[in-house]
Amino acid sequence: MSLFFLKRMSSFMVTLLAASVIVFAVLELLPGNAAQVILGETATPESLAAMEEKLGLNLPASARYLQWVSGMLAGESGISISYETPTAQLMAERLQVTLPLAIMAMSLTVLLSLSLGIYAASRQNRAGDVGVMSLSQLGLALPNFWLAILLILLFAVHLQWVSAGGFPGWTEASGGGIWEAIKALLLPAMALAAVQTAILTRVTRSAVLETMREDFVRTARAKGLSRRQVLWRHVLRNAMLPVLTVMGLQFGNLITSAIVVENVFVLPGIGRLIFQAIANRDLIVVRDVVMLLSVMVIVINFVIDVLYVWIDPRLKAVS
């Protein structure tokens, strides 16, 4: 296990390094001078020179990259141009909204998709299976932002069960405390989870059906185990590998998809931060937020790789 973990950790570090190079290079290759973009076309040569020195643009690209990476490793982030605040502080504040939102959406996705996928597989080609697959097809066709607007119209405008947008905070919500904050994230989580639930339901159904055709399942049935016992004792664990793969991709996708949904619900999360940073031409915030999202996706995939071996130890031999 230690050798496997060492290999995966090495791969993780290489991928992280490659991601940092790509993020830095893409922003470097953007047309125009970053200082000119920030100050506008009417900026004087003196103000441009001062801004270039402030951003470190007077240094070679390699020196600026090493300065950026060494600063991140030392826990020192850049200073936002528009907020005049360290980017680490900005991102830490916004993650208090985005991470709970993504966890809520992923929890809804896993709970619904595993239940529906197993239910559909156990009733293959019957009414229950057809109904679940029809619902999942509908879920695939619904854009997140359009579903978010429909949820606002139904639950906030018509039924008035929740507010249409905004976030009261985890400690500042009057009266309801944490419950008010959870209510504010519930509709966005549902909007984010809809498409992901549709995808994972279909993957779960296919994985369970494929596993049920294996020889060890027929052997278990021949020993007298019922269909339900075989499903819960033998099929599910072996069917989880492809499901875990998709779950890892989905969690990363939920975090990036939050950019649109957070703006629909006016939530002060990472998505809204990067949207405002792009609008304000704050390239320092854009660079650090994109790198943070890349790190989160890479970490999630690393955790999924470790879970593979925990579920099926035979994978250590081929890893």
Image (cartoon, rainbow, N blue to C red):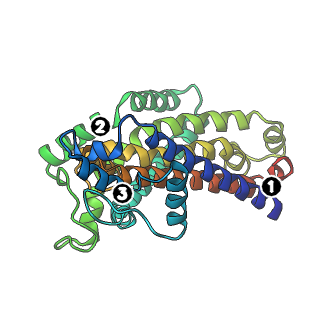
Q: Is residue 13 left or right of residue 316?
A: left
- Residue at the disc numbered 1: 313
Q: As rendered, which of 250 and 64 lies closer to the eye?
A: 64
- The answer, for residue 278, to whether it is visible in the render is no
Q: Is residue 212 left or right of residue 288?
A: right
Point out the frontmost of discs 3 and 1. Answer: 3
- The residue positioned 35% from the left and 52% from the top of the image is 52
- The residue positioned 47% from the left and 53% from the top of the image is 59
Q: Quadrant of the N terminus?
A: bottom right
Disc 1 or 2, which lies upstream in sequence? 2
Q: Quadrant of residue 41?
A: top left
- The residue positioned 56% from the left and 47% from the top of the image is 21
Q: Quadrant of residue 214?
A: top right
CB under 8 Å between discs 1 and 2: no
Looking at this rendering, what residue extends furthest in the front direction? 46
C-alpha separation, residue under disc 1 versus residue under disc 2 = 41 Å
What kind of element bears circle 2? helix
Please rate how many residues cluster around mark 3, counting C-alpha atoms within 10 Å: few if below 14, some from 14 to 19, many from 20.
Answer: few
Q: Position of residue 8 (x, y in %)?
A: 73, 55
C-alpha separation, residue under disc 3 versus residue under disc 2 = 40 Å
- Residue at the disc numbered 3: 53
Q: Position of residue 193 (x, y in %)?
A: 41, 44
What kind of element bears circle 3? helix
Disc 3 or 2, which lies upstream in sequence? 3
- Residue at the disc numbered 2: 145
Point out the frontmost of discs 1 and 2. Answer: 2
Q: As rendered, which of 61 and 46 lies closer to the eye?
A: 46
Point out the frontmost of discs 3 and 2. Answer: 3
Q: Position of residue 126 (x, y in %)?
A: 54, 27
Q: What amino acid is at disc 1?
A: Pro
Q: What amino acid is at disc 3?
A: Glu
